[in-house]
Amino acid sequence: MVTVTLAVRQDLTLAPDPSRVIVKLFVPGEDAAVVRTRARALIDRVAHLDDEETGRLLRETFDRFGSRHRDLDGTFHHHYDLVRHRIARARDLSFTTQLLLGAYFSHEYAVEAAALCNPSLVVHPDQSALGAGQLRVAVSLRQIGEGHLSSIGFATAVLGPGRRLTVADRSGPLVVGQRVGVRHRRDLLAAGLVEEDCDNEVTATVLDALPDRYDEATFERVLANLPLDLLSRSTSPDTLAHLRRASAASYATTFPADTALHQRVLWPATPAESNGMEDARFVRFTDESGPVYRATYTAYDGRRIATRALVSSDLRRFEITPMRGPGARNKGVALFPRTVGGRHLALCRADGETMGLTCLDGENRWLEPVPLHAPTDGWELIQVGNCGSPIETDDGWLVLTHGVGPMRRYAIGALLLDLRRPERVIAQLPGVLLTPDDVGRDGYVPNVVYSCGGLVHAGELWLPYGASDARVGFATVPVAALIAAMAESPSPDGRD
């Protein structure tokens, strides 16, 4: 394996910080292999405490944890509301007792205690107060905590001047996004039903009654008005549950305006992502309506994976929708930053080992991909894929790739696609750009360098990467030198 010595690693790294914690609901007994809640017994014990002891315990709890979290009393009261149905005389409890019960049904979770990895870079929405040659960027991060549960976090950094890199302080209480109402899309619901082979008279009737955009109240009203002779069928309860699941896969989450980007945590909010939101690939997408942030990530429920799309105008409100079709059936989908010839395109790895190009059709399904690059060299014979969205240059679409070789060792390479016909690979780096070094090879997942996307600033490719899922590093590569080092690829029909 030949390593092309163009990448310059920065000294600065981001390491997992176990003090970055959120508050989660905790129900004693429900974390065991055999679920048997102990909630009622705990409630009885707390309710029988006298007022003095109740007040003392609550004060001590706020003294220990209050500075680590935003609106801790609001969180405690929310968790109390989630279990109050088990309380026979809830109205007789004092507000102090309610808050203390909420505290007993809460626990801290360190979102990145196990690992911090797989970053991507996009231009930050705030470019104020910068000097010459500087660019503020948002860094997305895969955070992994106890139980290998992944969420999406952020950092803010400034690139330049030159190869200078500074990362803003990441301290302060974390905030999990609040789920808010969203206008669902009928075409995405229809595509999901087709993909899951759920086509019957109930689903057809529902789809016919829904408008192009609908809210949850409209959806439930359509279900409630279904004809009785359809509802009486033996398969209808399962179909209705399936419809609700498919519709609920789309949702929106938002953060308070006064939270800094690094305090925001995109946390699993649906059953499909209950075991993690993995490897977000962010890109700043631009069309005639202006720039918007888009991303893809892998939702994992503990058994199955599913690809999700995310869109935000400001990195404060995020709308999440499923991605449908054969081009989105596996991990590693990366969106192009603009349409090409009127087409919405994405890189993918639908077969699990070959990088391909997929296109969005008129029914919002990602089509069967065109193969771009299969495992060919020794360093990538297990599988190849992308390291984020294609980067537009004057010479073509620059695509960073990852390959997996012996001992499951990951390395990063590069391809160049034709600007107008991205189906055509016009050049390839003869070797690898970045490999696990002696310092970075050890970690939570050894022998891995992996990125979810970089960007170009001042003629340099800025590439964030996860080093063995132990830390996040940064490298710079001169774009002109990288493209000059690539070897031309012959055209598919044999002509140069």
Image (cartoon, grey):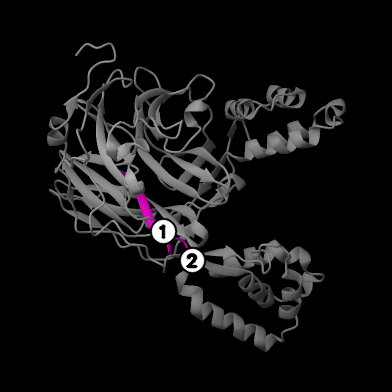
Residue 240 located left or right of residue 394: right
Residue 409 located left or right of residue 325: left
Whole-angstrom CA distance, mark 2 to mark 1, is: 10 Å
Q: Residue at x 56, y 69 (%)?
A: 107
Q: Is residue 87 above or below residue 373?
A: below
Image quadrant of residue 492? top left
The residue singled out by tag 1 in the image is 263
Is residue 478 on the magenta stretch? no
Image quadrant of residue 112? bottom left
Q: Is residue 123 above or below residue 141?
A: above
Image quadrant of residue 228? top right
Q: Is residue 355 above or below residue 280?
A: above
Q: Is residue 120 visible?
A: no
- What type is the residue that disc 1 sits on? Gln
Image coords of residue 253 (percent x, y): 52, 47
The residue singled out by tag 2 in the image is 70
Looking at this view, is 292 or 6 the one in front? 6
- Extreme-bottom residue of the structure: 52
Q: Residues within 10 Å of mark 2 (few under 14, many from 20)?
A: some
Q: Is residue 31 above or below residue 124?
A: below
Q: Residues within 10 Å of mark 1 (few under 14, many from 20)?
A: some
Q: Residue at x 60, y 80 (%)?
A: 58
Q: Quadrant of the C terminus?
A: top left
Viewer-nearest of discs 2 and 1:
1
Is residue 115 on the magenta stretch? yes
Image coords of residue 301 (percent x, y): 58, 47
Q: Which residues are magenta?
A: 110-121
Q: Is residue 442 visible?
A: yes
